[in-house]
Image: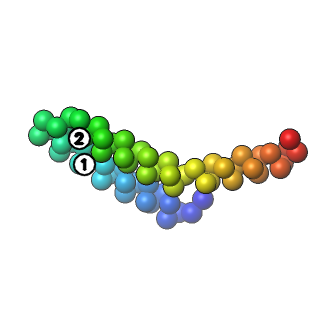
Amino acid sequence: MEVSLIFKIAAVGILVSVISQILKHSGREEQAFLTSLAGLLLVLYWIVPYISDLFEAMKKMFEL
């Protein structure tokens, strides 16, 4: 895993939490939830290839 990916995930987390708090305090809870969901989906989109590689490596290691 690259270090830049970890920094991107941290940046998205900070940005989403700030935007979510601003939206919650302005009374827009639904939009705050959608912002959090969008951040989660973005991070999952970045991480899924690494998880797939991990399972392929485990499969190859145990010859299943």
Marker disc for residue 33: none
State which tag comes first along the sequence, 1 or 2: 1
Q: What residue is shown at x 53% (from left), y 63% (from top)? A: 3
Q: What residue is shown at x 80% (from left), y 45% (from top)? A: 59
Which residue bears the numbered disc 2?
31
- In the displayed orientation, state which residue is furthest to the left: 26
Q: What residue is shown at x 75% (from left), y 50% (from top)? A: 56
Query: Mark 2 belongs to which amino acid?
Result: Gln
Q: Is residue 7 left or right of residue 18?
A: right
- The quarter of the picture where residue 31 lies is top left
Q: Is residue 54 left or right of residue 3?
A: right
Q: Secondary structure at mark 1?
A: helix
Q: Nearer the viewer, residue 54 or 41?
A: 41
In the rendered image, residue 41, in percent from the top left (x then y), is placed at: 44, 46
Q: Secondary structure at mark 2?
A: helix
Count of all numbered marks drawn on residues in the image: 2
> Dot 2: few (<14), some (14–19), or many (≥20) neighbours within 10 Å?
some
Is 1 situated above or below 28? Answer: below
Colour scheme shown: rainbow
Q: Quarter holding the N terminus?
A: bottom right
Which residue bears the numbered disc 1?
18
In the rendered image, residue 29, in percent from the top left (x then y), is placed at: 21, 34
In the rendered image, residue 64, in percent from the top left (x then y), is placed at: 86, 41
Could you tell me how far apart the alpha carbons at marks 1 and 2 are, in whole angstroms? 13 Å
Q: What residue is shown at x 17% (from left), y 45% (from top)? A: 22
Query: Mark 1 belongs to which amino acid?
Result: Val
